[in-house]
Image (cartoon, grey):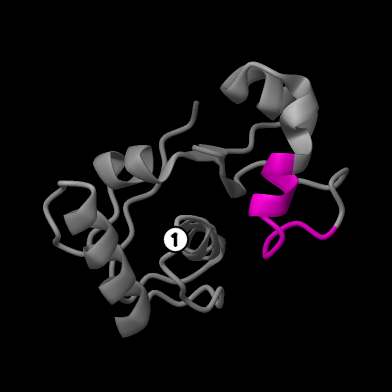
Amino acid sequence: MAQLPTLSKGSTGDAVKGLQNALNARSYPVAVDGTFGASTEGAVKQFQGNAALEADGIVGPNTWRELNVYMVQSGDTLSAIAEQQLGDAERWPEVFELNRHLISDPDRISPGQLLALPN
């Protein structure tokens, strides 16, 4: 799988939206606006502390792993992701529901999108 980006306060873009969506999926509510500001940083630090990670507000490999995020690859479908990551293709609706802030049509996902997976 492609390496997930390192994000911190001041980062912007779709990867930040994926982070914000994942934080919401783990009950750390933030706006999904693509801007890593003070509220996103606070939610990241709170998540990191609760996950026994260094609460530095920087989202790197350890934080991504604990958030249980998957980066969409070329040719992926939600059912293929559910099969590969969750062991059951029929669980794709769970992936879809967790990512409603990012996906409006379950048949339209894009390479590089960061999707939260069910724990």
Residue 110 visible within the image: no
Find residue 26 and report its horizontal and vertical position in percent: 45, 55
Q: Nearer the viewer, residue 80 or 51?
A: 51
Find residue 66 and report its horizontal and vertical position in percent: 34, 41
Q: Which residues are magenta?
A: 94-104
Residue drawn at x 36%, y 74% as measured from the top left: 40
In the image, residue 11 above or below residue 63: below
Q: Secondary structure at mark 1?
A: helix
In the image, residue 100 above or below residue 109: below
Residue drawn at x 54%, y 61% as measured from the top left: 21
In the image, residue 47 above or below residue 68: below
Residue 28 visible within the image: yes
Residue drawn at x 69%, y 19% as measured from the top left: 83
Find residue 103 and report its horizontal and vertical position in percent: 75, 56
Amino acid marked by disc 1: Leu
Residue 12, image quadrant: bottom left
Find residue 13 and report its horizontal and vertical position in percent: 52, 68
Q: Which residue is mark 1?
A: 23
Q: Nearer the viewer, residue 73 or 101?
A: 101
